[in-house]
Every structure is written in C-alpha cells, then in structure tokens.
Image (tube, rainbow, N blue to C red):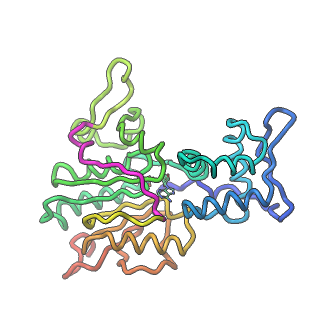
Amino acid sequence: MDRETGPVMLSDKASGDKAAVSAGPISSSTEIKLTAAEFRQISDLAYQRFGLDLKRGKEALVAARLGKKLRKLGFQTFAEYHRHVLADATGEALIELIDALTTNHTSFLRERAHFEFLGRAVNEEFREVSTLRVWSAACSSGEEPYANAMASSPARQFRIVATDISTRVLSTAERGVYPVSRFDEVPEDWRRAYLLRGRGESNGFYKVKPQLAQQVEFARLNLIEPFPQRAPFHVIFCRNVMMYFDKPTQQNIVQHLAGCLERGGYLFVGHSESLTGVEHALHYVCPATYRNQKPEGGSRLWR
Ligand SMILES: C[S@@+](CC[C@H](N)C(=O)[O-])C[C@H]1O[C@@H](n2cnc3c(N)ncnc32)[C@H](O)[C@@H]1O
C-alpha cells in the first residue's frame, strides 16, 4: 500500500488568529506572509468549490504550496491572489488552486489488489455481463483507468468512464503517452498487447493503443457537484481522494456513488482511506472494497 503525501503531511502549530505563516522569499530580502484572515478566505473557497477540508494547522501547507504560485504570478499578498482566483472567469485559476493544494500522484496498478480483484470479477462474477461498465472517479493522469481497461480486456467488452476535477491531468490522460519507466509494474504481456513503443523523438515513451484508448472516455467532474445520470456501473474506483473531504462530504459522495452502482457492483476506495463513520448502504467485502448488496448465495470471490 502506498501512502499519500498530500495535505495531511504539513502542519503548523502557530495558527492563532494573529499568526502569519511565511511563504518563503520573493527575493532574498522579502517574503510573503499568509495571515489568518487570508488562510480563512482560501480554505473557505477550497471547501465551497471542491469540498477540500483545510483545517487549522494546514497554514504552512497552504503558504508553501500557493506561495510558489504567487511568486510566479507576481502577487505580493495572498489576498491579491485570492481576488485573482475569484475574478478569473475561465475557472483555470481555480483549477490551478486545487492542483496546488492536492496531489495528482498515481501509478499503473497502484494498490494492485484492486486490479487483481477486478480481473477475477471480470472472469467470474461478471462473466454474464455483455459490456462491463467501470467508472474511475478522480482518475488523475489516466494510469488508473487504462490499467482498468487492461485488467478487463480481452475477456470482456467494457466501457470505462474516467473523471477528475483537474483539466490539466485530464489532458495528460487523454494523450495516453507516458515514460517507459511508469510501466515498471505492468506485466510484459499487457505491454505487448496494449501499448505502442515510441521511436525517434518518442523514444522512451509508450502510447496506449487506440483500440484500448477509445474505450475510455474522459470528462471533467467535481465529486461534490451533482452527478450526471448514466447507466449504473459494475465497478467504481474512487481512490485516494476521499482523504481530502470531511465526513459529511464523504458521506454525500459515497451515497451518490452507491446510487450509481449496479446491484452486486463494487466500490473501491484507497487502502489508506476509511469509510468508518460514513453512513452508507454498501457491504464491506475486504479492505478498501465495498459491494452494493450481497449477491445471493454469497460472493464467488470471497468465501
Ligand atoms: C491522488 S489523486 C488519485 C488518483 C487515483 N485515483 C489513484 O488512486 O492513483 C487525487 C485526484 O483527485 C482529484 N480531485 C481532488 N478533488 C476533487 C474533486 N472535488 N472532484 C474530483 N476530483 C478531485 C485531483 O485532481 C487528483 O487528480
């Protein structure tokens, strides 16, 4: 299991109302301070728009992550930056804010047990299903949905919907081109079947084959906003994003996700995330794996 190095890592104990946290030097003689009022403005914005739960104690994280952005954009204060984000009608500044405050860290076959589970489910529990529908929610740069596609193919016809809030990571995902080193864990037979090796200036990269890529549909979706109506999914991956939300937000999201699952469908969350204290109607199957209603006669995968 790998652990996030997201917002939980940094904290600052000196977070009283009068405290200000330094964002590091603009030049050798100046530095940008994050005041308590500015922290509140930014954390309120992140909560309202993304559900991001920046509690007191995260001032140093915000100062460090957004400080770099301020310096790049030439702002002298966090209040100026906050006004810039609010005024930006394109929404790009807001996306950059969430990108700076969360991590897009991901990999092919991250938390491998889920892909092994999916591979078995494809051949056993879902063997009668003509087209398997999988949703990779918070898919980051695409490794997770492409690995889902590799785990489902060729045994089953499938359709994968992959969503994230960040348009930046989604554009990487849609290209489907990654350095060869990203595939270290991917079995050789999958590489041969599903990837094209780059030549010339693409040397050192793999591209996901079009036959596989065209079965993956990418779209921007904010998990705290209403979900578009779709046919229910057999499997939903919503991993390593729950940790950014407070319990009420997690509860709303899990209940929505549960409503998007087929009977007998599975929800995977990150292994370091827990749904303890979150009310939902799903059944616990094994770590980080939940099921929408128990299948009659029990699961073939877990006896
Ligand atoms: C750490 S990555 C997880 C990627 C992948 N699921 C995995 O486990 O490897 C977290 C992703 O959540 C996305 N995210 C953060 N807040 C979100 C929100 N409110 N709605 C949708 N995606 C969000 C981020 O853009 C980021 O790409």
- Number of marks in the rendered image: 0
Q: Nearer the viewer, residue 293 or 78?
A: 78
Q: Which quadrant holds the C terminus?
A: bottom left
Q: Which of 272 and 138 is in front in this view?
A: 138
Vertically, is 208 above or below 241? Answer: above
Relative image position of residue 61 (x, y in whole percent): 69, 53
Q: What is the residue that sits farthest to the top in this orientation?
A: 200
Q: What stretch is highlighted in magenta?
A: 209-224
Q: Which residue is drawn at 79% across and 36% down?
A: 26
Res. 269 image quadrant = bottom left
> Left or right: 122 with respect to 81?
left
Q: Which residue is drawn at 54% across and 60% down?
A: 50
Q: Nearer the viewer, residue 298 or 79?
A: 79
Relative image position of residue 109 (x, y in whole percent): 37, 50
38 falls in the magenta region: no
Relative image position of residue 48 (x, y in whole percent): 59, 64
220 falls in the magenta region: yes
Q: Residue at x 75, y 51 (%)?
A: 79
Q: Which of 225 and 175 is in front in this view?
A: 225
Vertically, is 69 above or below 205? Answer: below
Res. 289 image quadrant = bottom left
